[in-house]
Image (cartoon, helix red, strand yellow):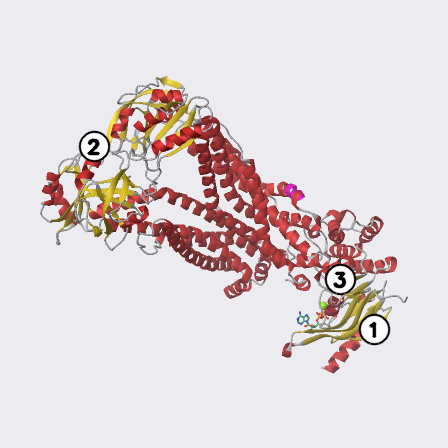
Amino acid sequence: MIKASLRGLLHRKLRLTLAIVAIVLSVGFLSAITVLNDTLNKRFSGLFQTLNENVAVQVQAKEVSTGETPRLTAAQLQQLSNVDGVNGTSGDVSDEAVVPFKKDGNEVTAQGFVGVGASGDDPLGLISLREGTWPKTASEVALSANTAKLAGVKRGEIIKVFVSQVGEPKPYTVSGIVEFSGGRDSLAGESLVIFELGHAQEMFYGQKDVFAGASFSADSGVSQEELKKRITAALPSGFEAKTGDEVTEEQSNQLAGQFDFIKIILNTFAYVAAFVGIFLIYNTFNIVVAQRSRELALLRAMGASWGQVTGAVILEALIVGVVGSTLGLAAGIGAGMWGESALTGALGAEIKSAGVVVSPAAIITAYVIGILVTLIAAFVPAIKASLVPPLAAMREIARPDKSLKGLSITGAALAVPGVGIALLGLYASFTGSIFVMGFGLVLALIGLMLLSPLLARPVVRVVGMAVAWGQAGKLGVRNSLRNPRRTAVTAIALMIGVTLIGAAATVVSSFKHSLQADIGKYDVAIMIVGPNYAPPNGKTGFEASALDKVEALPGVTGAEPWWLTIESSIAGQPIPVVATDVAAAQKMWKLETVGGALRTLSAGEFVSDHNTAKSLNWKVGDSVKVRVGTTERDYKLVGIYKATPSVSGPVFGLPAVDDFEGKLAYQGFVTVAPGTDVAATVAATEKIMAGYPGVTVGDMSTFLKQFNQIFDFLLLAVTILLGMALLIAVLGILNTLLLSIVERTREMGLVRAIGLSRGGVVRMIGVESILISVFGALLGLAAGVGIGVLLCQALIEGDFLTEIVLPWGNLAAYVGAAMFFGIVAAIIPAWRAAKLDVLEAIAYE
Amino acid sequence: MAMQPAARAVTVWKIYGSGEAQVQALRGVSADFERGKYTAIMGPSGSGKSTLMHCLAGLDTVNAGEVFIGDTQVTGLGDAGLTKLRRDKVGFIFQQFNLLPTLTAEENIKLPLAIAGRAPDKAWYDTVIQTVGLGDRLHHRPAELSGGQQQRVACARALVSRPEVIFADEPTGNLDSKSGNDVLNFLRDSVRHHGQTIVMVTHDPNAASYADRVVFLADGEIVDELHSPTADGVLDRMKKLDRRGDADA
Ligand SMILES: Nc1ncnc2c1ncn2[C@@H]1O[C@H](COP(=O)(O)OP(=O)(O)OP(=O)(O)O)[C@@H](O)[C@H]1O
Ligand SMILES: [Mg+2]
């Protein structure tokens, strides 16, 4: 029995291959993403391991405190270095956003910008001189080899360096070039500028002989834990000590946290692809087993029991599942390795590779998805096949259309309430209403999937009228309708990807139009935006005084700076703190007062938009805890304004900026009198901002264009990330067609025998393929636009959007693309069908 | 000009395989199939009946010799030529699985015309439909028809495009005698009343007795023929052939 079944398996190489390919693709992408994640994680944590190689204990200011950030004095540092067991001591004088300029006046582009103060050789041995000397005076700097290369300067030459506290680039003489342990030019492609110690302390901390913290190496025989205990005993207040291992872990977690967002997105798309793959595997196995129902019936007629027949099919599925999962995992590991080298080639080639990481989770996921889905996909038709009376199944397969009634009723029973629940979640406002909306949408989507076999008939008929010409085309339409379930499952695989793309396109198009319409309402003509090489915290951007110069330009009627930090939390939520002159902002952005007053704020006051106030339950007069950097203070809500797509969220007054890491403004808005030459004003403003690294200036249309480009890029990214899911779906169409053709071999022979040409056969199959893919695309667009419109409506409720604009151009392009993919998917099946020998086809069993 | 035969084989050789496993399925077969006549091909199993028919119909290639349908030389035609030949000049009836399951009986009958993009000749179409005698079952799918009904639909389909010749390989092989006779009557009427040419392979002496002429094949050669056969006459010859085969062995 088992032998017969296994022989049957090997006999059908095509079907076997298709089933395995289906599993490999679905499992492969997921495995690739997991392996890539794990491998990159290990590689980045390796970075911090070298950074903290000789650090036994590190002393840092405590996380949250009120008032001034504490500093270590030179005397305190000396005291700590005298602790028993301390070998080397390195005081920490460092800052981010220290940006060197190239000779041509443009700032260097690098993976991060670090500035440190040093008085000579690094006691912990991470950095050492390669050539020249350490900086001895306030007009000298040493550069890492990577920085010198990026800036194109050599020892003895002049380099301009921007330090946020200084506020403008200053020239320095390069006294030496340094390297990292192991002779590396950089740790991870970053820029490093080393100032003379006292000069750095004065710039960064405003006084000599203070340090932000310190790192210590240990005498041999003293453990990290032991040294930490001893140093903690000697610590001044406001400081804490951590072991080198703790610091490494913290830092890599922090970095991993920054990558989490990308990881979550990649994983999401990988699971979407795997989900689509489930349909592919299911359909493939389902068809394969259904085609064998005659053979299974024969076995039953010869006395095989129900269990034997089902068991044989399950065994087959298990073998195919294991083989497919293993190959998929292997392909995933290969793709993950390739992905790592491609990504790090672009980003962190300097970081040493830590080898490929294949976690147990990756292996388990691969096998669970591959095997489980295959088993389920095989089980359902096997049960069906074993329940059919043997003789009925052995007769010519003339499966009359099964009723779609039950399926459709279930689908409607899910879809209709689903839409209702989604609308409820949209319009009713209670906590978690967004999840209610999501739940409703999921129900509606499942309902639509169950309804899709019923929808196949009318949709395919109508689309068929457009794409099917001639008798061959008509036969293609018939064929795609003969098994609506099969057509629907194949189309659903495509629908899933298209749904997401359609929803994203709808939201993006609405965003673009809303922003354009809203921006047009204000007199703001020019925008100044800070750099994006570091998260805004006051250390990147420009000095507010620079805007005074802008205000003095001819025709300029106002120029307002906005400060921004994301190192903050409001009422415990990670909300950015934005500060500006609220009275001026109210005028410039035509803010509507909802409660309290919109006026210039003093210390301890803030205003908020009505949506944030509502969702966090704030009323005018309420006191809210706000943390900026390490400082936490109470702020009183004095005014509430109506949110617009341009301005929303809590806004603070100028005094709040004192708590920012630096005093640089991040954004500036300029209004001009009518008739002013905007292009000339932009050019003049650019000149004023030239000394601030990464600051860009543009008129509103330029910025709108940039926003549009960002939106378009996001949409493109979504489309590309869904590419795998779409590829799997197209493969699904190919699979279904190939298998259907095997099933209809004799029909192919028959139509050829009565005069259908090869081209006719090709057309027949092409039409069937196009119909399936277009049906899938239409289902997906219907669902996607529906979801997109609901999301937009939710965003309108939140005043982020003002209008919903459907992206007709995109939608039409998606249908066109679906047609194209349909044609591509048909190539191989059509070619196979066309080259069938008429005689053999007719004699095919 | 003398009446040209509807189909013609000239010293046709057909060899399958090579070396040890070589089978000479047809060994220099020459035969004319007259226009407007009903010819049956008989012979023991494996004698080359199906092979001869496939070669005549252009479904299979020959190793040597020539095949003509009307004035068209079949041997040497490419796929496009063969497709045109099937569209315009020949009709087929197979032993089983003759119809497309997605089409109704009527649509199946019209299929060759639709494929060729020709409009049916109304009068002829009505005649054919009448002769099939399916009545209201014309709009049913094949799965809802009996085997005999299905085969009559297949015959009608072969007739509807008025091909030069219809080839039928054991068209009654899967039917009981009543349904079989219905089909055979149908075929004979189309020859008698409408001048259709039919070449039919069969094992059944009774089926052969409907034909105007019977050609006997044995070991890939034509060994005998019989005009205006009766079932008994055919049976007699068959027995002789069998004996001959036994003697050879
Ligand atoms: N594709 C093929 N490959 C090899 N040998 C073949 C092939 N088709 C037929 N033959 C051989 O050619 C010979 C004639 O076969 P054919 O099918 O014409 O016989 P037949 O007279 O139709 O027999 P039956 O009455 O059993 O249908 C047989 O010996 C057969 O084994
Ligand atoms: Mg035969």
**Image mark 2: chain:** A
Give the Cα distance between marks 1 and 2.
Answer: 115 Å
> For this view, does B178 lie left or right of residue A525?
right
Farthest residue toward the top? A596
- The part of the image, by quadrant, that contains residue A579 is top left
Q: Judging from the image, what secondary structure is the residue with disc 2 in?
A: loop
Question: Residue B121: horizontal and vertical position, in percent?
Answer: 82, 50
Q: Which residue is mark 3?
A: B172
Specify whether disc 2 shares its chain with disc 3. Answer: no
* Residue range (magenta): A461-465
Q: Nearer the viewer, mark 1 or mark 2?
A: 2
Q: Is residue A342 left or right of residue A506?
A: left
Q: Residue at x 46, y 28 (%)?
A: A796
Disc on res. B225: 1
Location of residue A589 by image quarter:
top left
Q: Quick one: label 1, few (<14), some, or many (20+) residues within 10 Å?
A: some
**Element class at badge 3:** loop
Query: Mainly helix, strand or loop, the magenta region?
Result: helix
Tell me residue A635's x, y (percent). 27, 24
Question: In the image, ligand 1 is in what quadrant?
Answer: bottom right
Q: Amino acid type of disc 2?
A: Ser
From this view, report whether residue A419 is shown above or below residue B130.
above
Return the residue at label 2: A65
